[in-house]
Amino acid sequence: MAFDTKSGGGGGGGPMADINVTPLVDVMLVLLIIFIVTAPIMTYPINVDLPQRVINPPPQVKEPPPPIDLRIDAAGQVYWNNGPVSTADLPKLMDDAVKADPTNQPELRIDANPDSHYEVMAKVLAAAKTAQMLKIGFVQQEL
């Protein structure tokens, strides 16, 4: 609260009832400058791609082909759907499976014995990547 200093001393003057508005005006001027500076930035359009209404329903999803069970035993032998194959034949088998229907690939389920060598698993995964197989899963058969 401000006090009146005009009176010379003795008790004639009381406290002033006026509010000091200078800090309020300073804050309002700062806010006005901020809004003036940021207003042109907010006027630029932002492109938003909204989903469009589709008249035709989407095509029915095809039934997925049966999965491919690939098993690696402790000795490093690879089995393709319970039939033994060599690691050299894997790229061709995987490529044929993908080329049968590239949009609806079978799932490759790999079951590796914990005692098998990592080198065999690396060859299997490299062949799957080369053949561009998209659905690869790791399973562990119960003993």
Image: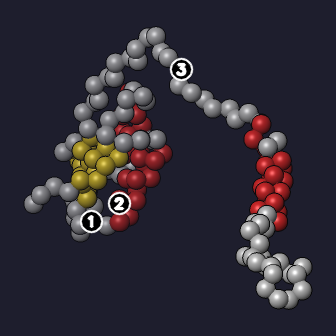
Q: Nearer the viewer, residue 61 or 126?
A: 61
Quadrant in which residue 123 is drawn: bottom left
Residue 53 visible in the snapshot: yes
Q: Which residue bears the numbered disc 2?
A: 120
Q: Is residue 44 above or below residue 119?
A: above
Residue 85 spot, x, y in % from top left = 28, 47
| Residue at x 84% of width, y 53% of height | 33
| Residue at x 31% of width, y 67% of height | 117
The colour mode here is secondary structure
Q: Nearer the viewer, residue 81 or 66?
A: 66
Q: CA distance from mark 2 to mark 1?
A: 8 Å
Q: Which residue bears the numbered disc 3?
A: 52
Residues at discs 3 and 2 in contact (Cβ within 8 Å): no
The answer to whether residue 5 is left or right of residue 54 is right
Q: Nearer the viewer, residue 103 or 10?
A: 10
Q: Say which element carries label 3.
A: loop
Q: Say which element carries label 1.
A: loop
Q: CA distance from mark 3 to mark 2?
A: 49 Å
What is the quadrant of the N terminus in the image? bottom right
Please identify the residue farthest to the bottom as the structure is shown.
9
Amino acid identity at mark 1: Ser
Q: Say which element carries label 2.
A: helix
Amino acid identity at mark 2: Val
Residue 105 spot, x, y in % from top left = 37, 33
Residue 63 spot, x, y in % from top left = 28, 25
Residues at discs 2 and 1 in contact (Cβ within 8 Å): yes
Amino acid identity at mark 3: Gln
Please identify the residue farthest to the top as the structure is shown.
55
The answer to whether residue 126 is left or right of residue 114 is right
Q: Nearer the viewer, residue 60 or 113?
A: 60
What is the quadrant of the C terminus in the image? bottom left
Q: Which residue bears the numbered disc 1?
A: 116
